[in-house]
Amino acid sequence: MGYWGMGLAQSDEFCEIYGQFMEKYDQGESVAGISKDILAQYHKEFDDKDGIMHDVYFALAKAEWMCCEQSKDILKRVGEIIASQANIQFYKELGATASELKIRQKKLEAFNAALQIPRAKPRKRYPYSLDVEKPFPPMEIGDCFAYKYDQGKRVVIILDWVKNPGLRKMVFCCILKNTYSLAQAKVTDFLEEDVGCIACFVAEDFLGKSNLKKVGAVSIPPNIKNEKLGKIIPLGSKNNFKWDYSDTESCSLRDFLENKNFKLHGFTDIGWFGIG
């Protein structure tokens, strides 16, 4: 888990859960169903008393409050976490200072008090139609973004845009093989890191803005997709961002960009492949 402040929304876990919730809400799923699915997903990996679960409950409570459909069980669990100061102890273990912990406690108490007053109107749903392309998050060629993977961060790098007539706009990008801490990601030379996957994604299958944190940028040659693949479009899916590439044959991003004789390996129906 990573945090960059004492506010409720200043943690990776909170932002990821809240963004995931609202994406499903905008597509018409029920509030109770979304919360149930997210909790079930996290309970596969974490005990309910694990510190990671604090931000899961906080994000769900905030999202439900925004939608005017609050769960008594989630409200109760949030109150228990705050009253017991379990979250303060968790942040202390993560390295927060005494002054930061005082700020955190005040923000938690204010958050809990706000949850007790129902919102006047539910947040509107903003569904996107299949006839109207969902927008990509703001990004440029060469941008490097970290996203949550397992207990750390994985990095996706924007290589090119694909704008073929008759096809939806796609982003051509690579997902690096290794996992990093956020601090490591900010100082790593990604050109020297091994690539786990290279694929093209439509916006519906790409990560949402709330899941991405920019950690740098690298120089990418122009028109790299056509230079390397021509008319081939290796179409990726959301599964690509969760796949384990530890055993995938690969090469560094620099070698991929500079070597004209690279080979593709392991292409499957979900569109990922290794390179070497």
Image (cartoon, rainbow, N blue to C red):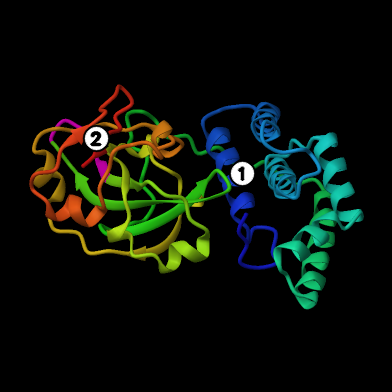
Q: Is residue 131 above or below residue 63?
A: above
Depth check: give the residue in front, 82 or 199.
199
**Mark 2 or 1, nearer chain start:** 1
Q: Looking at this view, name the residue that lies furthest to the bottom.
A: 99
Q: Position of residue 250 (x, y in %)?
A: 27, 43
Q: Is residue 7 above or below residue 244?
A: below
Q: Classify 10 Å Cα crowding around label 2: few (below 14), some (14-19), many (20 and above).
A: some
Residue for point 76% across, 45% down: 50
Look at label 2 and name its amino acid.
Arg
- Classify the position of the N terminus by image quarter: bottom right
Q: Quadrant of residue 238?
A: top left
What is the span of residues highlighted in magenta in the rendered image? Answer: 165-172
Q: Position of residue 207 (x, y in %)?
A: 43, 43
Q: Is residue 213 above or below residue 231?
A: below
Residue for point 85% across, 35% down: 72
Depth check: give the residue in front, 258 or 89.
258
Kindly state the secondary structure of the residue where label 2 is placed. loop
Depth check: give the residue in front, 107 or 12.
12
Location of mark 2 (residue)? 168
Q: Looking at this view, name the residue that lies furthest to the right.
A: 83
Per the model, the C-alpha gap separating discs 2 and 1 is 28 Å
- Classify the position of the C terminus by image quarter: top left
Look at label 1 and name its amino acid.
Ile
Residue for point 81% across, 43% down: 49
Q: Classify 10 Å Cα crowding around label 1: few (below 14), some (14-19), many (20 and above).
A: many
Q: Quadrant of residue 164?
A: top left
Kindly state the secondary structure of the residue where label 1 is placed. helix
Q: Position of residue 242 (x, y in %)?
A: 46, 36
Q: Position of residue 56 (x, y in %)?
A: 69, 44
| Nearer the camera: disc 2 or disc 1 | 1
Location of mark 1 (residue)? 17
